[in-house]
Amino acid sequence: MDNAKNHILNNKRSYTTIIVIILILILGFIGFKNGFRIKNNFTVGKIGTVVLKIPLPLTSIFIDETKKITTSKDNEEVTIPFSPRKHTIIISREGYFPWKKDFTVPSGETLELHPLFISQNATGEIITQNDPEYFNIRNKIIKDITPTAQNPKISFDKTTTLWLDDNAIIVQFGSTTKKVIQPDTIIKNVDFYRNRSDVVIFSTTNSVYAIEVDSFGGQNFMPIYRGQDPAFVKASENTMYVFDADNLMEVLI
């Protein structure tokens, strides 16, 4: 008995260490089962969720350049759990420019991301002078006045305004004002992309571009149309009229 007692006393530190390690492992296992993970700064956070609405089937979602999900239907909502660490998502579909975001999901929260799908080859149709609306559309483009702070464009959902100031695209939502881009070349036309308030389109030099308003996670910037000297006005949610080198077209966006 005395030998056993002496053994325990002599190895008290070792036994204490083993017990502490076992407790840490048990707590770690319980935490893992309940969705807690180690963050990049070695603190503990809970698994969050990313929600993506993907409009087109057969779209590939690459997570941290390894895991891949492929959508199977129109307007599919994809929900993905993420540890509260830095991650990257790349959205890819044949015929479209890839879209990428770097992000960290807040601990235990849901982050909604809104991918941008821009075709690599602009499609549409020529509007000839035989069309009764040809000159009305052409004149509307030619006479288009760029928005100002006093007379801005207003987004479809009425949350955001847009104007040009010293060749810079400015947006305002609530009390927040942001400079989206200020290129060296002259901006001829600017508007919101489709019915979205987080993406704008503008024409300059030989192209019409789409650019995200927010630089969070990387500000995606893609050409919608390339030509010679295009000017445009929006025609509908999904199309714009483009006048370029005496050609009038309705182009999908």
Image: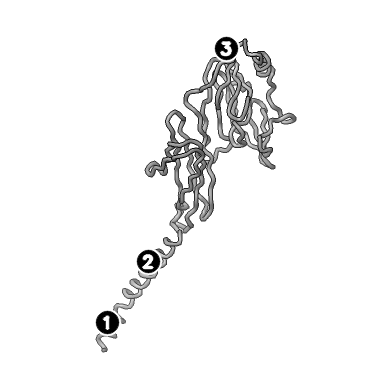
Specify whether 32 is left or right of 183. Answer: left
For the residue marked with disc 2, what is the amino acid? Leu
Instruction: Quote the CA–CA distance across marks 1 and 2.
Output: 26 Å
Cα–Cα gap, marks 1 and 3: 94 Å
Mark before the other along the chain sequence, 1 or 3: 1
- Image-quadrant location for residue 179: top right
The residues bearing labels 2 and 3 have C-alpha atoms spaced at a distance of 70 Å
Q: SS at mark 2?
A: helix
On residue 25, the disc is 2
Residue at image location 41% in from the left, 40% down from the top: 70
In front here: 14 or 84? 84
Amino acid type of disc 1? Answer: His
Q: Position of residue 184 (x, y in %)?
A: 58, 23
Q: Name the residue under label 1.
A: 7
- Which residue: 48% across, 23% down? 121
Q: Where is residue 125 in the image (x, y as percent from the top left)?
A: 55, 18
Q: Describe the element under mark 1 as helix, strand or loop.
A: helix
Q: What residue type is labelled 3?
A: Ala
Most distant residue in the left direction: 3
